[in-house]
Image: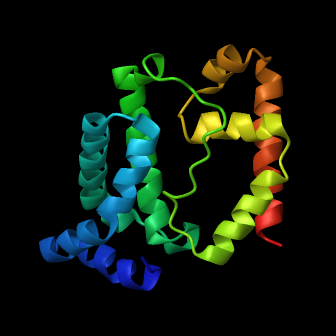
């Protein structure tokens, strides 16, 4: 999924082109569903979140801003937020086990060099930073839920996340 392929489809979708939207869906739905399913672990809830995300994409395609990222990253953020909403609505977090060491990079659309760099950067994080970032961004826990889950003060949890993300940003831009 190359941004050069997706951008014209999204622009046409913004103009109400149903065929372009269909092509956009065909090219991205598998990857986006994998992300939603990874977060929700419930197929029906993941399908519902993906459907909600594509409705939002259809209605808000004109709001995409290329200076803030690629089309797929914009779409991933929409799916992620819809999945988080679903988590909160269905209270799935109480039903699933929260494994701290399940880092799934397969659902992220990046090339081999970028994946290798990302894995290397993540490996440089402190264990607490990795755990906090994983639980917040892949499992959808809020800061207060993180505090309860890892039994650590709120300020410490926020610091781990903030410092970890800054370290990842620095590492990835080198």
Relative to 25, residue 136 above or below: above
Q: Residue furthest left?
A: 18
Question: Does 73 sit left or right of 61 as displayed?
Answer: right
Rendered location of residue 24, percent (x, y): 27, 71
Residue 14 at least partly seen: no
User: Is residue 154 visible from the viewing direction of this image?
Assistant: yes
Tell me which corner region of the image, top left, top right, bottom left or bottom right, holds residue 19.
bottom left
Q: Residue at x 82, y 63 (%)?
A: 171
125, 51: nearer the viewer: 125
**Residue 39 % position (x, y):** 46, 39
Image height of 92 relative to 112, above or below: above
Left or right of residue 173: residue 27: left
* Relative side of 173 to 3, left or right: right
Q: How is the image coloured?
A: rainbow
Image quadrant containing the C terminus: bottom right
Q: Position of residue 137 (x, y in %)?
A: 59, 41
Identity of the residue drawn at 65% across and 32% down: 100
Residue at the far bottom: name it.
Answer: 4
Quick one: quadrant of the N terminus? bottom left
Taking the spot 37% from the left edge, 83% from the top edge, the residue there is: 5
- Residue 8, percent from left and from top: 33, 83
Residue 81 picture quarter: top left
Give the vertical position of 43 relative to 115 (above or below). Answer: above
**Residue name at image x 23 percent, y 52 percent:** 55
Decide: is 97 above or below 26.
above
Q: Is residue 102 left or right of residue 60?
A: right
């Amino acid at each position: 999924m190359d941004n050069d392929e997706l951008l014209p489809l999204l622009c046409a979708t913004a103009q109400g082109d149903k065929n372009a939207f269909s092509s956009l869906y065909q090219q991205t739905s598998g990857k986006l569903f994998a992300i939603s399913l990874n977060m929700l672990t419930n197929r029906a809830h993941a399908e519902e979140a993906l459907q909600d995300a594509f409705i939002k994409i259809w209605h808000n395609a004109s709001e995409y801003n290329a200076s803030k990222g690629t089309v797929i990253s914009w779409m991933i953020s929409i799916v992620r937020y819809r999945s988080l909403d679903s988590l909160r609505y269905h209270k799935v977090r109480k039903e699933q086990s929260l494994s701290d060491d399940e880092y799934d990079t397969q659902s992220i659309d990046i090339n081999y060099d970028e994946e290798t760099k990302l894995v290397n950067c993540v490996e440089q994080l402190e264990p607490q930073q990795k755990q906090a970032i994983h639980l917040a961004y892949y499992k959808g826990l809020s800061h207060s839920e993180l505090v309860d889950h890892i039994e650590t003060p709120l300020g410490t949890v926020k610091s781990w996340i903030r410092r970890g993300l800054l370290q990842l940003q620095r590492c990835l831009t080198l």
